[in-house]
Image (tube, rainbow, N blue to C red):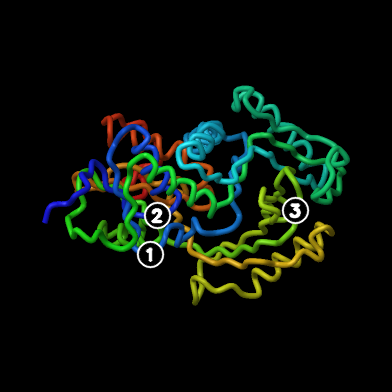
Amino acid sequence: MATSYQVDVTVRGGGIFGLACAYEMARRGARVRLIETRALGAGASGGTVGALAPHVPENWNPKKQFQLESLLMAPVFWAEVAAAGGQDAGYAQTGRLQPLADAEAVARAESRAEGAATLWQGQASWRVVPAGQFSGLVPPSPTGLLVHDTLTGRANPRGAVAALAAAITALGGQIVIGEPSDQTPDQGPVIWATGAPGLADLNAALAHPVGGGVKGQSALLAYDAGPVPQLYAEGLLIVPHADGTVAVGSTAERDYDDPTSTDAQLEALIDRARQMLPPLGSAPVIDRWAGIRPRASSRAPMLGAWPDRPGHFVANGGFMIGFGMAPKVAATMADLVLEGRDTIPAGFRVTDNL
């Protein structure tokens, strides 16, 4: 049966990597069909946190360089997504605060500031500053000092998913939930961005473990903190969003019984956040989330050709950094699939996980 929609590229998976790849290819003029079997953002991309934060500016490697480039791309990327589809992803480059526990931590942070001055190319800063310089949601610091980086951004995960979907449709792309009614085979190159289930499929197809799922839990509190920096303190991510909420996360669980249930581990995170930040003490919890996040064995995103499967490609493994990596992942996959230009960094290929 012929399809009424001519397809240049098929994207399988409606999480952040699949949507970002489909958007970038549609933006470049490709006719895109994105197929999601359950719902957009049904996996890890439907969470609440949305922290787009860099790794520390030291021991530089291809992953950190890729992440830097992606975070620097983010303001333009998300502005263009909003302009194309008319929906806001809740993106802002609000920065991040981290408390410093002792003199050794201060010295280490100051050394990293020197690294950032060089490695971040003057486009963002990492500074040691007095905690009294900030108000609102400020983590307690035994030294009275904080790391303040200006590279970190935030996005509302569900808003970002909706914004990308609207942009794809506005650019002429097609989004299918379930299987296409025309029952045609996938057309053109196929990009598999299917998250944790996709990693399981790869493990089976390659007869080798290249990644797996890690459960995470997070919560959303009703508290309007304004456009203030997000926090990383005592192992907690605390991210104020533009819609008058604050996200708190997250756990990292290798062993679990129910992938989508929340439990006492999340309640402990909420309690710790409230103890650390008194303004959150009476803020009601309006959402609790749990899901499985895809983690490649290399801990870098897994990009490029599916071995021994011509015309098929993989974009997966965005464990905890998927939203921050999405602009660069999308550009890299579009370069490869549409233009035949392979710019994938060392350590990111499927074969690097074998």
Q: Image quadrant of residue 94?
A: top right
The residue that mark 1 highlights is 38
Number of numbered discs: 3
Q: Are marks 2 and 1 in contact (CB under 8 Å)?
A: yes
Amino acid found under the numbered disc labelled 2: Gly
Among all residues in the image, which is located at the extreme bottom?
A: 257
Amino acid found under the numbered disc labelled 1: Arg
- Asked if residue 255 is positioned above or below residue 32 in the image, the reply reads below
Residue 19 position in % (x across, y down): 41, 48
Amino acid found under the numbered disc labelled 3: Asp
Q: Distance between the residues labelled 1 and 3?
A: 32 Å
Residue ID at (79%, 50%): 137
Q: Image quadrant of residue 290?
A: bottom right
Q: In this view, does 103 lie to the left or right of 24?
A: right
**Which sits in the foreground, 91 or 230?**
91
Label 2: element kind: loop
**Which sits in the foreground, 350 or 274?**
274
Label 3: element kind: loop
Residue 327 position in % (x across, y down): 47, 38
- Asked if residue 121 is positioned above or below residue 47 in the image, the reply reads above
The residue that mark 2 highlights is 14
Q: How far apart are marks 2 and 1 (CA)?
A: 9 Å
Q: Which of marks 1 and 3 is nearer the N terminus?
A: 1
The residue that mark 3 highlights is 224
Residue ID at (70%, 54%): 244
Q: Which of marks 2 and 3 is in front?
A: 3
Q: Residues within 10 Å of mark 1 (few under 14, many from 20)?
A: some
Label 1: element kind: loop
